[in-house]
Amino acid sequence: MARPLSEDKRNAILASATEVVAALGAGAPTAKIASGAAVAEGTLFTYFATKDALLNQLYLGLKDELAAAMMAGYPSRRGLQDRWHHVWDRYMDWGAAHPAKRKAMRQLTVSDRVAERTRQIGGRAFHDVQALLDESLAAGMMKDQPPAFAAAVMEALAETTLEFIAREPKRKERYKCGGFAAFWGAVSKP
Amino acid sequence: MARPLSEDKRNAILASATEVVAALGAGAPTAKIASGAAVAEGTLFTYFATKDALLNQLYLGLKDELAAAMMAGYPSRRGLQDRWHHVWDRYMDWGAAHPAKRKAMRQLTVSDRVAERTRQIGGRAFHDVQALLDESLAAGMMKDQPPAFAAAVMEALAETTLEFIAREPKRKERYKCGGFAAFWGAVSKP
Amino acid sequence: MARPLSEDKRNAILASATEVVAALGAGAPTAKIASGAAVAEGTLFTYFATKDALLNQLYLGLKDELAAAMMAGYPSRRGLQDRWHHVWDRYMDWGAAHPAKRKAMRQLTVSDRVAERTRQIGGRAFHDVQALLDESLAAGMMKDQPPAFAAAVMEALAETTLEFIAREPKRKERYKCGGFAAFWGAVSKP
Amino acid sequence: MARPLSEDKRNAILASATEVVAALGAGAPTAKIASGAAVAEGTLFTYFATKDALLNQLYLGLKDELAAAMMAGYPSRRGLQDRWHHVWDRYMDWGAAHPAKRKAMRQLTVSDRVAERTRQIGGRAFHDVQALLDESLAAGMMKDQPPAFAAAVMEALAETTLEFIAREPKRKERYKCGGFAAFWGAVSKP
DNA sequence: TATGAATGAGTGTTCATTCAT
DNA sequence: CATGAATGAACACTCATTCAT
């Protein structure tokens, strides 16, 4: 092979896209993404056929990364609350450690350039969280609501909490803790 | 002297902007907004100096309307939970009744074309909710968290709930009720 | 109305397109066409929705003009050969007088950006020639061939002749005459 | 020393170019030509310095092939009309048998990427036809016209006829015959 | 004041050609 | 020699804003 597609370059493009999309939204110019990756405008299109393809793959990559972060060191044998707490804390830590990734993910979640199908695939990465959710629901959590609703509630509260952490990093621990309390209150049975 | 600009036209532009922004996001072309208002492209700019001005004023208008809807028939003399329940229900009813307005508001909330200052001004419309919040916090709700955080938690849960109502209007009452339960659980002290 | 679409500007664009397409083919950049018309790049698109629309309308305009030129002063009462001679001479005169138009027409005829439908509509302008053709065929011309074939033969010979006239304008009369002789020989029955 | 470049690869590129240019015109991407030849994009440029070089050589190759086809089995001793008929029939047969080659040749003839000089060289392959032409002219054919004109008339009529054959292959023989009648009428003295 | 034509910078994408592997 | 990734100048088209009417 002549020159293999460089994993480095691909990553550089994704990294640049993360920054630029975080700052400018899904409308960010591909030219800016390319230059942020120190790559020619045309090169971007040898790694991603279209801007939409790039955006969708970025979304998927971020989702995967977040899912992996959330499940790292997952205490399978502990009780429900402990496991939720673990997941929540990992989410917070990841979001606080990677503000651009989190912001980019949010922009992409809101953008209509990420296809429905991509969102479905992205959801698969969270099968472990899904399992935890199903178990919790079976145990009486969030009486009478569909699992998707509980998941959305978690995501909304996590997102809100991370927004405050991003604004006041010094209060990270307090928000992290208060956020979990809110989540647990929202979701656990009375 | 009466205002020479037609209030009707201004409202038509805002109404059209609501629809178009709901559907296309903040990137919606001014030309489309103008044509939706049955007004010439240039006319839009005699009512709003720039597209950003239009977007910011639309944001403000929607916020005002929502705040008014939330406080209509506010039972000042009832207990905290009843008052919150009222506010929540009015929020849900307004959002369910005006899906385009809600969606436009969401798009604008996420867009960087709405200035920080606009968001602050928009917050003022909610002073009554703020008062309720302060009272609740003083009573021990959401231990140790700033009022803004509690407000954001409410908004996030309300938004999430409305999203589900929009998708499954038939389950409106169930989501409305379950959403409030989640909110109250998230926010009330243990 | 604010400022009506200027017929002058439209014509300037078509005229510029004629020159540029004649020189560069249907691949000519719209930017060059616009600048040749002393008009901003974007203005071209207020007069023609797409480049294809411009090209198709240009084709139609040229066809109409040629058809009109061919039928000017048509001697309806003369014999077949005289009428064909008239039509041939007017074709030659028009082509010799407007080399860019002729060349542009040729480029467009060959280009796949001119739609089949456009070609059909363009053909309608030649209904008088068509009638002459039908009459001639009925009189025994081009035994056993479809009208379209006879028309194509004429066009091919006319095009060839004009090519030579364009290269050697001084011999215009000789080519014009020899071209007609060839056409008449090709087409008249033995 | 044998040529280090593979004749096979060169031919594959030319064959692919024939197909692709026939379908897409001279603007066809070199990448598509290369992939049609099962050859890397860059390889194309070791066989042909530039796209123009490829196009010009393709033109020459097609012209040579056509000229050879036209003269195969040429009945040198027969009369003028028989010899013209032979040449005409071979042209038709070749064109009908190789529609892509014919179409590519047409696209190239019309394109400005084929240099004037290339066209001249291409003409040389037709020296036998040229000789036939000169002989015919000396015998009084096409009174007072230059040989090039007669040649062009033949080409134009042949091209037209082939176009109709391509559209209605079933009527091949009729067009072939009618086309020759037209040609002969156009060209023979009255 | 209302209109909509005019503007030109900006957009995503293509492509002939180069050159590292 | 063969490969195909890299390049950046084009390209067709969009759009917020201006301004002649």
Image: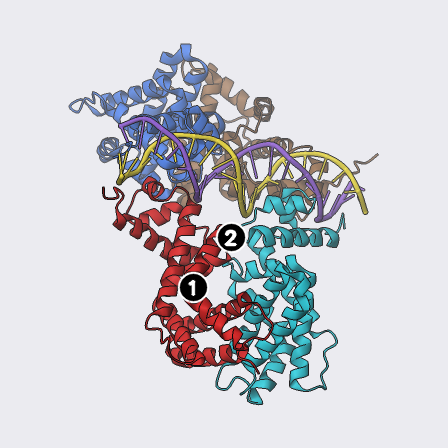
Chain colours: A cyan, B red, C blue, D brown, E yellow, F purple
Above or below for B128 versus A14: below
> For mark 2, what is the residue?
B116
Q: Tell me if residue C98 can be seen.
A: yes
Label 1 vs 2, first from the N-terminus: 2
Above or below for C183 versus B114: above
The numbered mark at residue C25 is: none
- Of all chains, the one bearing label 2 is B
Residue C74 percent across, percent down from the top left = 21, 23
Residue C131 percent across, percent down from the top left = 22, 33
Residue reaching furthest right?
Answer: D1
Residue reaching furthest bottom?
Answer: A139
Nearer the observer, D15 or D188: D15
Q: Residue at x 30, y 42 (%)?
A: B40
> For mark 1, what is the residue?
B126
- Of all chains, the one bearing label 1 is B
Residue A186 percent across, percent down from the top left = 54, 79
Give the residue type that dot 2 points to: Glu
Residue A100 is drawn in which quadrant? Answer: bottom right
Q: Tell me if residue C21 can be seen.
A: no
Give the residue type that dot 1 points to: Phe
Residue B106 percent across, percent down from the top left = 46, 61
Q: Secondary structure at mark 1?
A: loop
Residue B46 is drawn in which quadrant? Answer: top left
Q: Residue at x 42, y 55 (%)?
A: B59
Is A39 left, or right, of A110 in this rendering? right
Q: Residue at x 48, y 56 (%)?
A: B120
Q: Pointers 1 and 2 in contact (CB under 8 A)?
A: no
Is C183 left, or right, of F7 in this rendering? left
Q: Residues within 10 Å of mark 1 (few under 14, many from 20)?
A: some
Q: Secondary structure at mark 2?
A: helix
Is B109 left, or right, of D68 in this rendering? left
